[in-house]
Image (spheres, rainbow, N blue to C red):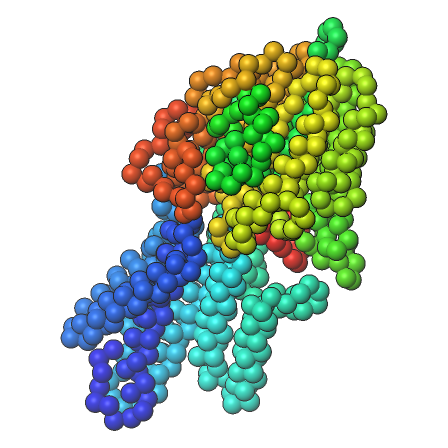
């Protein structure tokens, strides 16, 4: 620390080892902190900011280092220990959500985590101080060894911290480059630590260790280069820090429930196997079974389909069209600057247009299930199911051993663990309706498995375009005479972006190409609407399963609950309904009760939605978003409550709330951090009880940041 007369190269080296260590620690700390605070901010900007903060922090640390040089040995020891202990707090505590948990039901664990991170920080400070002991030239060698030890300790802690950070931050999965970078840095830290210690070994072993380290870095680079599935992926993953984090969690999982209380494992009861993030929350039992937000309040269950009576003749035929990933503001009736949907605009003039309609589930699996089950997704149990490529098979856990040689896991879907007790098509069948579903082959595995219940005919069109789907729907319509319920699910606006000859184009930007796809769907909707002219007593409902975000370089959904991702168009033209505009918050989950009312079917108690015809007021509507990773763990758990003016998005994993202005399409949005969350929305979130997600403990290679459908 105190630079001696620079007479030998080794003493020269000792001058820069400490500042370099400080700079590295500062940069890593700033990176970690910035990334954890910067969700919603563009990644490059976040990294640039991290670099700047890191440089500034390193300067401060170096200045402190020089200042300490003037202190006597004992004082400098205490200052260094205190400095590192305090500096370890934000670095260790922020990614694990410790600050927030200090106020929650797990305050003791959180306080222990804080004390633990301070102890580790203090130990590193002491180690660094110790490494600079020794005054005379004959002890230079000894000092070098201590410095190597200190450097190795700092790097190892940084590596473990980064690995834990990556595996606990679900939102990072939307940024694969950032994940690779974090893993790369973590692995580099671990390898450098090993190299720093290598001279401790005998000469021969030293060479072996060095080559092993070089090999590990090469493997790491291969992972960053995003090698394909199969043996390479397995080999590359073996070299990675995540396994050490997983191993650490496995070793500290005392009650063997699959979750550790340490390293971001999330188990709030280390000694109780019945309580863990994968446990099912039993509402009202006084126990926070799933370690999130305490015990859930009790909720009524929907009555089973069979308990309903069957009254007189059905009044309306119903056609329900859901367009996958159709964002409200890109349609003409919702104010798109391009005339993308003239047919929807014409329909809107005769229909009720719900200006504040939101999906109840942030991506297809959740949204369509919620629509037909009549409850918000969190009321159901969910499980991870792998969709394979190129074979398009669905696999349940454990996936290992089920994959053939040239098969890989394309994405992990979140699907209901068991069929919901109430199901709209079943209720309509029982009511005497013919039920027909028509969609494209593109989504067939998931749709067949989860949504194909209760249909007299479940039809899949051959081909990816809506034109084929509408062809099939029209041919089905010609066959049906009796009261019918037709559900058509269209797909053109969903990625990938393709060209449709003869359809208006709106430029080559991502948004322009998306608008082109929307226009293509509208053209097909026009054919359907025209064919339905003259159908007696017909209710026509056109909506979307969720929105789409388009300004992050690719089309995305199912990763957040911001305006563009969840605001959907909703048009209802029905007998006896007065056309116009309704600004009350409406939800996809309202379609169940609405269709029941339109068909004169009794509405069972316990459904979450309301009949849209009678919709008024400004009650917040709920949107759930759950995602499960290939290891069966929940990596994204969001819930939003939206009314006319504001939205509160609650992150159940981070245990934090964020407030946004409804209708704000800016990305990143203007988060109203200074505005307190509206009490009525917080109350809506509280009422919306949690149910848990079924999880399994198997692990499997391959993952995807978002679902294809
Ligand atoms: Zn979808």
Q: Is 473 drawn above or below residue 149 in the view shown?
A: above
Q: Is residue 422 above or below residue 50?
A: above
**Residue 655 percent location from the top left of the image:** 43, 40
Image quarter where the C terminus lies is: top right
Q: Is residue 90 left or right of residue 471?
A: left
| Location of residue 573 in the rendering, given as x and y in whole percent from the top left corner | 61, 20
Residue 525 drawn above or below residue 13: above
Residue in the foreground of this view, choosing between 236 and 104: 236
Q: In this view of the protein, can residue 249 be seen by the observer?
A: no
Residue 12 in the figure: left or right of residue 431: left
Q: Residue at x 44, y 18 (%)?
A: 617
The spot of residue 167 in percent (x, y) is 52, 55
Name the residue: 76% across, 32% down. Answer: 473
Tally of numbered tags: 0
In the rendered image, the vertical position of residue 185 relative to residue 256, given as above or below: below
Q: Could you tell me which residue is drawn at 69 percent across and 54 percent down?
A: 409
Instruction: Pick out the residue farthest to the right.
Output: 479
Residue placed furthest toward the bottom: 7
Q: Answer yes or no: is residue 233 visible.
A: yes
Q: Residue furthest top?
A: 312
Instruction: Please state which of residues 431 and 219 is positioned toward the viewer in this rendering.
Output: 431
- Residue 121: x percent and y percent? 34, 62
Position of 383 compared to 104: left or right?
right
Quadrant into which the N terminus falls: bottom left
State the residue at coordinates (46%, 85%). Answer: 199
């Amino acid at each position: 620390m105190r630079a001696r007369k620079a007479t030998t190269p080794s003493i020269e080296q000792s001058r820069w080892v400490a500042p370099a260590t400080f700079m590295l620690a500062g940069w890593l700390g700033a990176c970690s902190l910035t990334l954890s605070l910067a969700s919603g901010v563009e990644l490059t900007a976040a990294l640039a900011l991290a670099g700047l903060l890191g440089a500034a922090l390193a300067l401060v640390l170096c200045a402190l280092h020089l200042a300490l040089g003037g202190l006597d040995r004992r004082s400098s020891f205490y200052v260094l220990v205190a400095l590192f202990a305090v500096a370890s707090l934000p670095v260790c505590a922020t990614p694990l959500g410790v600050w927030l948990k200090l106020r929650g039901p797990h305050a003791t664990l959180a306080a222990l985590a804080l004390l633990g991170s301070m102890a580790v920080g203090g130990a590193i400070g002491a180690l660094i101080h110790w490494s600079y002991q020794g005054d005379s030239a004959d002890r230079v060698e000894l000092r070098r060894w201590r410095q190597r030890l200190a450097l190795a300790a700092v790097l190892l802690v940084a590596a473990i911290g980064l690995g834990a950070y990556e595996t606990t931050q679900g939102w990072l999965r939307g940024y694969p480059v950032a994940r690779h970078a974090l893993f790369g840095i973590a692995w580099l830290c671990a390898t450098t630590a090993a190299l720093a210690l290598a001279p401790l070994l005998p000469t021969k072993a030293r060479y072996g260790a060095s080559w092993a380290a070089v090999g590990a870095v090469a493997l790491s680079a291969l992972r960053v280069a995003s090698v394909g599935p199969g043996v390479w992926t397995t080999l590359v993953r073996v070299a990675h820090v995540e396994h050490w984090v997983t191993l650490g969690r496995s070793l500290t999982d005392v009650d063997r429930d699959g979750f550790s209380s340490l390293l971001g494992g999330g188990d709030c009861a280390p000694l109780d196997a019945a309580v863990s993030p994968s446990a099912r929350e039993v509402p009202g039992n006084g126990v926070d079974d799933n370690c999130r937000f305490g015990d859930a309040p009790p909720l009524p269950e929907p009555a089973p389909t069979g308990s309903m009576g069957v009254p007189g003749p059905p009044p309306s035929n119903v056609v329900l069209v859901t367009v996958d990933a159709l964002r409200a503001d890109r349609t003409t009736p919702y104010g798109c600057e391009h005339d993308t949907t003239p047919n929807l605009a014409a329909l809107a003039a005769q229909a009720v247009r719900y200006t504040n309609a939101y999906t109840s589930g942030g991506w297809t699996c959740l949204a369509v299930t919620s629509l037909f089950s009549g409850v918000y997704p969190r009321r159901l149990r969910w499980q991870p199911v792998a969709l394979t490529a190129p074979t398009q098979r669905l696999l349940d856990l454990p996936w290992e051993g089920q994959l053939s040689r040239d098969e890989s896991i394309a994405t992990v879907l979140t699907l209901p663990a068991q069929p919901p007790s109430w199901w709209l098509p079943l209720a309509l069948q029982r009511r005497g309706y013919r039920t027909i579903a028509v969609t494209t082959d593109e989504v067939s595995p998931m749709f067949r498995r989860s949504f194909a219940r209760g249909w007299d005919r479940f039809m899949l069109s051959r081909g990816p375009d809506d034109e084929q789907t509408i062809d099939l729907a029209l041919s089905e319509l010609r066959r049906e005479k009796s009261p019918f319920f037709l559900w058509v699910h269209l797909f053109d606006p969903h990625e990938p972006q393709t060209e449709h000859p003869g359809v208006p184009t709106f430029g080559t930007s991502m948004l322009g190409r998306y608008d082109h796809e929307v226009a293509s769907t509208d053209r097909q909707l026009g054919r359907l609407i025209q064919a339905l002219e003259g159908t007696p007593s017909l209710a026509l409902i056109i909506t979307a399963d969720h929105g789409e975000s388009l300004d992050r370089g690719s089309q995305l959904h199912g990763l957040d609950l911001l305006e563009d991702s969840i605001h959907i168009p909703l048009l209802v033209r029905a007998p006896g309904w007065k056309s116009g505009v309704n600004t009350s918050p409406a939800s996809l989950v309202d379609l169940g009760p609405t269709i029941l009312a339109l068909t004169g079917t009794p509405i069972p108690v316990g459904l979450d939605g309301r009949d849209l015809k009678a919709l008024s007021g400004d009650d917040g509507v709920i949107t759930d978003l759950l995602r499960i990773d290939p290891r069966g763990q929940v990596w994204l758990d969001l819930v939003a409550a939206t009314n006319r003016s504001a939205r509160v998005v609650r992150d159940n994993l981070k245990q934090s709330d964020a407030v946004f202005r409804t209708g704000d399409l800016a990305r990143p949005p203007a988060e109203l951090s200074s505005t307190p969350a509206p009490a009525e929305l917080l109350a809506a979130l509280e009422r919306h009880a949690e149910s848990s997600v079924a999880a399994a403990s198997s692990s499997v290679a391959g993952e995807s940041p978002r679902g294809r459908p």
